[in-house]
Image (spheres, rainbow, N blue to C red):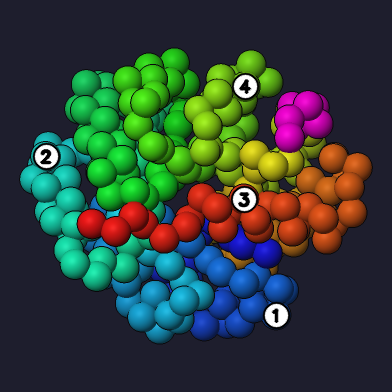
């Protein structure tokens, strides 16, 4: 199994991070992808990847909620790191748009997102995209790059069937499926029954959004087994098949960047 989205470099795991990784390995998690958030998250993320080379893999990006007054300089610095020879970053993420709590920086978020989409296109890297209360605006940005060789993941998808179909009209993209799928009031089961498994990957978004039966607890990569099990029941497929297919999708998304 592959956890395509985890923040286990965060302070929530400072007391038992090694144990968390050990539990992930014991649960059959073969790889954990780590999205960056802001300047401060780069160091802890890279430290974890150095501790577990080839197992924990870093991304580079500025989260939309972290688009602050210095966002342009932050992006410039991040781009320089991404473009370095031998850069370890396997994706541009976590990037996107989020107008849920604060819509005052719509223009800045949109421009920041567009710039990072350009990074992905020029570097041949996948995008890991966060979207909350901004579906239409996000689609509008991506449509401007429809002819670019983009691929990636729409992280933590929890939208409608129509929204899913619109997002999957972008070839090379998959839906990130996490713990929300297992929640009692989630509409995702009905949506995912009507979509191809070949356009889905599994994720935790640790430490957030733990699946049932762990809901309310700190999420961690080993809990992805519960999401896999639930997705298999939704799709009416054997768990090994769901694991094989979603792992293959993740491998395709996170394939090696193109040579410069």
Q: Provide residue 191's location: percent of width, then percent of height.
A: 74, 27
Q: Is residue 200 above or below residue 21?
A: above
Looking at the image, tell me whether mark 4 or mark 3 is earlier in sequence order. 4
Q: Is residue 67 left or right of residue 88?
A: left
First to last magenta residue range: 190-196
> Which of the two discs, 2 and 4, sits closer to the camera?
4
User: Residue 106, position in %: x, y?
Assistant: 27, 22
| Residue count near mark 1 (Cα–Cα under 10 Å), binned few <14, some 14–19, many ≥20 | few
What percent of the width, then of the height, locates residue 120? 31, 44
Q: Is residue 103 above or below residue 196?
A: above
Question: Is 141 inside the magenta-drawn segment?
Answer: no
Q: Which residue is under mark 2?
A: 72
> Which structural element holds mark 2?
helix
* Image quadrant where one finds the N terminus: bottom right
Mark 4 = which residue?
165
Query: Is residue 192 rendered magenta in the image?
Result: yes
**Mark 3 residue crowding within 10 angstroms, few (<14) / some (14–19) / many (20+):** many
Q: Residue at x 65, y 58 (%)?
A: 247
């Amino acid at each position: 199994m592959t956890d395509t989205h985890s923040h286990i470099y965060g302070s929530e795991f400072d007391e038992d991070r090694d144990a968390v990784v050990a539990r992930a390995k014991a649960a059959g998690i073969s790889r954990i992808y780590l999205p960056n958030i802001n300047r401060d998250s780069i160091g802890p993320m890279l430290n974890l990847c150095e501790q577990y080379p080839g197992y924990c893999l870093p991304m580079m990006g500025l989260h939309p909620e972290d688009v602050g007054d210095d966002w342009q300089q932050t992006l410039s610095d991040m781009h320089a790191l991404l473009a370095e020879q031998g850069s370890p970053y396997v994706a541009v993420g976590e990037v996107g748009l989020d107008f849920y709590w604060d819509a005052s920086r719509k223009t800045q978020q949109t421009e920041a997102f567009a710039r990072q989409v350009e990074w992905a296109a020029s570097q041949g890297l996948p995008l890991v995209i966060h979207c909350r209360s901004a579906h239409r605006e996000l689609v509008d940005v991506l449509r401007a790059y429809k002819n670019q060789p983009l691929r990636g993941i729409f992280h933590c998808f929890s939208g409608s069937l129509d929204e899913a179909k619109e997002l999957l009209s972008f070839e090379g993209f998959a839906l990130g499926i996490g713990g929300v799928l297992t929640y009692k009031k989630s509409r995702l089961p009905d949506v995912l029954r009507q979509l191809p498994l070949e356009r889905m990957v599994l994720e935790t978004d640790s430490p957030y959004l733990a699946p049932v039966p762990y809901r309310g607890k700190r999420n961690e990569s080993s809990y992805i087994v519960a999401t896999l099990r639930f997705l298999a029941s939704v799709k009416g497929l054997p768990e090994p098949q769901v694991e094989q297919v979603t792992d293959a999708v993740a491998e395709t998304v996170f394939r090696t960047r193109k040579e410069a």
